[in-house]
Amino acid sequence: MIIVLFIIWILILIGLLSCIYRCKYINTDISNSIGKLLKTSVVTVCGYVLFLNAYNKNAGYLFAALYCGSIDWLMLFFLGFLKIYTDFTYSHKKIKWIMYFIAMLDDINLLLNVKFKTAFSIGRICYGKTGFNYLCNFKPLFYLHLAFSYLLIAFVILLLIKKMREVPQFYRKKYGVVLFTLAFVIVLNAMYIYSAIAVDISIPLYVLEAFLISYYALNFMPEGLVEKTLSLVVDDMNSGIICFDFQGKCIYANQLARDLFEVQDDIRIFEKYLPIWLERRHMDGEEASVWTEGHIYKDEEIYIKAEFKKIYDDKNMLIGYYFCMSDRTNEIEKYKSAVYRATHDNLTGIYTREKFYDRVNEVIHMNPDIRRLIICTKINNIQMINDLFGIEMGDEVLKQQAEILKEKAGTEYVYGRLIGDKFAMCVPKELFDIDSFVQKNAKISRHYHNKLFGVCINIGIYEVNDVDEPVSEMCDKAYIAIENVEENSECNVAYFDNDMMDEISFEKELIKDFDTALNERQFKINLQPRVSKSGRIHGAEVLVRWEHPKKGLIMPGRFISIFEKKGLIYQLDGWVWEQAIIQLKRWKDMGKENLYLSINISAKDFFYLDVYKILTGLVNKYEVDPSRLRLEITENVLMTETKTKLNVLSALRKFGFKIEVDDFGGGYSSLNMLNSNLIDNIKFDIRLFNDNINDEKKLAVLDATVLLTEKIGKGLLVEGVEKEEEANLIIGHGCEMFQGFYFSKPLSVDTFEKKFL
């Protein structure tokens, strides 16, 4: 019998020690608290076993004190474990230390019992040569020990009951087993204390309790918890989940999947979709697949992203399929909207330049044998409409132009807005009706015609000869044709030809040679005198010529517009300005400070250069009187982005420069602008008379201009005078300053100085 009990205790100790080792290996807060509990259980078991078998009475009392005292600490460490296990916190931290203090007093009481026998006595039951000890003659101090132990146990039981009431049904077993086992232990321990039973039969259950705590705290997973948790998670997902077994039977569909396919409780309806999905996506031999397709939901089309995957067991046997369905309608609509915004013009709704180029390239290569035309349009004076009548009216003109292109919508027609007032269309040559197209554009021109100016739509046409030619270059050629159009009606048409191709080559050569020409001083300034009616020279306009080493003398009419278009004009203008100021410095040193020079400022100079800083810096550098330098600007410069440019010109005039308006009457003059203190002189181009010098209406314009300038105190210079008849006529109408070939053609600086100085 003793041997059997000994083996049982050894097995119990081995079990406890293995649990302690596992807790140490896991090394978490809860496993560490269980480790303390298990170590105390080892002390309790060993203390009781040694007490039972002690032959020496004093040793028996000592082991009994160890056994009884360890139960207090067992309960205290049980509370420490429950603090983590049930998320309990002491309302006052002092309570914990008070309980530790009472436990130590109880331990002292039990140790004193070894000598004074103030708590209990020990009896022994003999079986032949063997026997075992038991506790007896309990005294008040022992009952105080019991009271403290049962108080701790009651606290433990209350914590477990409280936690069981708080947690879901799934987790109650986790706490209930521990609670009921502990209650059973207490009942057995009470029977041992208050009955004639000599052996504490609750000791094995203490050990069982330790094992249960270790298992339920570290390993236990409530039955069905995983399945229920996954089911709840899947139901709460933003995707519809549909599962089938290997035979195609629908075994699960979450709520969102049922909503997407308008299925109520009978999920077998999904079984009719499975073969369709598998066949449509050819997924019989695939392990997984993803696709997006349209789906009718409540009479509206939505887009569903479907993810398919086969499910295998641990032996790689097919056990089913699952589909994950998610509504991607908003994402796809946003994507479509973003693509549309990236490829379509916001104002007109037609293709942007880049999309037009791409689409034309696709169409041309799709049917390369079809002869096609690239048709480009440009609306003249659209900026003037914006400035005078508001952007809304300008936008309306652009939208009407786009509507004309949309009328030709079809798979063979491609159209787009390239930039600003420039539109383009690619059409099959045999389907294009040029007369109808011109009439519709002329209608826009007539609708917006105004006494001050006319809206003119020019059309350039290029026939595609090489399908591999970049579409951008095709459009460039159509716009080269527009630049050569003769504006004599509301809508003018020009076709690109080989001569224009030669012009393109010429332009490219000039652009390529520009930097070299500037560095090698191939550009030369010429001076065209300004003469009074008495024949006196007052100054000259600075003009530029290009003495090309291979092409010879190139006149400004051949390169100025090219440099303006390519954004190079500001570099040339800056060089001319400095040469003009250097010339004024030379005349100053010669004592000829009575002469002035006039230079031109283009609209693009204001964008690329700090005009004020450069001009003021140059006159300061060369110590030239700024009043000897006149700045010529066209009316159109002032009528576009007026405020910015007027501020610059106003600052220049305050510095001392003289401001002249060139080509007065050829643009869109503003009387308010002329009446300001900004303008000093006006240049009137007599070439507006178009060789009909005696036209009474135009002479009336000249008379009005002379009178206007006299009244507002502005200087007037008539340019373009080429004949004696013209000179005599305009002198007779009160003009006093002139410039033109009749008086002198533009001269080199040396020739000018030799002739007039």
Image (cartoon, rainbow, N blue to C red):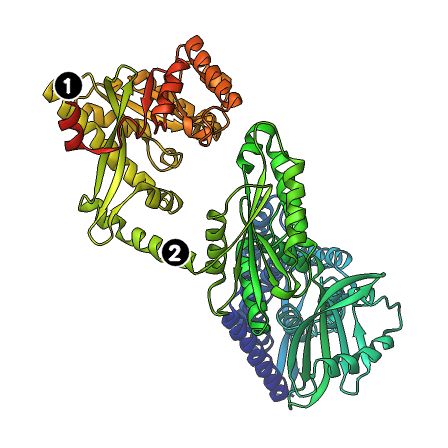
Q: Which of 26 and 493 is in front in this view?
A: 493
Q: Which amino acid does label 1 sit on?
A: Lys
Residue corresponding to mark 1: 592
**Would residue 165 appear left or right of 336 to someone viewing this image?**
right
Element type where label 2 sits in the image: helix
* Residue 513 to residue 667: above or below: below
Q: Residue furthest left?
A: 590
Classify residue 122 by image quadrant.
bottom right
Quarter of the image with the N terminus in it: bottom right
Q: Disc 1, disc 2: CB below 8 Å?
A: no
* Residue 563 to residue 186: above or below: above
Classify residue 577 by image quadrant.
top left
* Residue 590 to residue 111: above or below: above
Packing grade of label 1 (10 A; few <14, some 14-19, many >=20) is few
**Would residue 471 appear left or right of 576 to someone viewing this image?**
right
> Which mark is drawn over residue 504?
2
**Would residue 723 appear left or right of 303 to someone viewing this image?**
left
Q: Distance between the residues labelled 1 and 2?
A: 44 Å
* Residue 682 to residue 325: above or below: above
Q: What residue type is labelled 2?
A: Ile
Instruction: Give x and y (percent) for residue 475.
Output: 50, 56
Packing grade of label 2 (10 A; few <14, some 14-19, many >=20) is some
